[in-house]
Image (cartoon, rainbow, N blue to C red):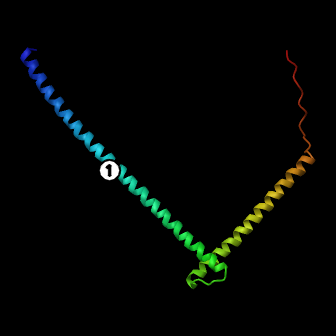
Amino acid sequence: MKKNELRELWGKTEKQLKEIGEKVVVIAKDIKKDAVYGAKASKIGIEKLSLETRKKKTFADIGSEIYKLYKKGKTPEQSVVKFCKMADAINRKLSAKERAGTTLKSALTESKKTAKKSPAKSKSKPKTKRKKK
């Protein structure tokens, strides 16, 4: 190649490299904007989730207070009484499950005690020690 051709080729290459560099800068700025947007969107999503959780807890607290009134004999609105009765039924089922769990645990404990007192007879031959050579 001649020097002039080499200089011309280098000039084109240099121009292309500058264009690529400028494009990379633009892309980097866009990525940064997208990252900032993504972070802000995530923060808003988390804040919304937090507010939804607080709202659900508030509803649960309201229900708890109404149920306490119901148990004290203070009649809340009739539309709420049906939910209080449902809660009573659930509480009865929970108590029954707790009693069943306690009974099962006691039975297991007793079974283990009995097993320790009368060890099961083994039908396998006793193991003998091997002599080292």
Q: Is residue 26 found left or right of 47 in the rendered image?
A: left
Q: Residue at x 80, y 62 (%)?
A: 103
Total numbered circles: 1
Amino acid type of the residue that numbered disc 1 sits on in the rendered structure:
Tyr
Q: Is residue 106 found left or right of 12 in the rendered image?
A: right
Above or below residue 132? Residue 58 is below
The quadrant holding residue 94 is: bottom right
* Residue 48 placement (x, y as % from top left): 42, 60
* Residue 126 placement (x, y as % from top left): 91, 33
The quadrant holding residue 96 is: bottom right
Q: Nearer the viewer, residue 66 or 3?
A: 66
Q: Nearer the viewer, residue 89 or 75?
A: 75
In the picture, the quarter occupied by the N terminus is: top left
Q: Residue at x 45, y 62 (%)?
A: 51
Q: Which residue is mark 1?
A: 37
* Residue 68 placement (x, y as % from top left): 63, 76
Above or below residue 53? Residue 87 is below
In the picture, the quarter occupied by the C terminus is: top right
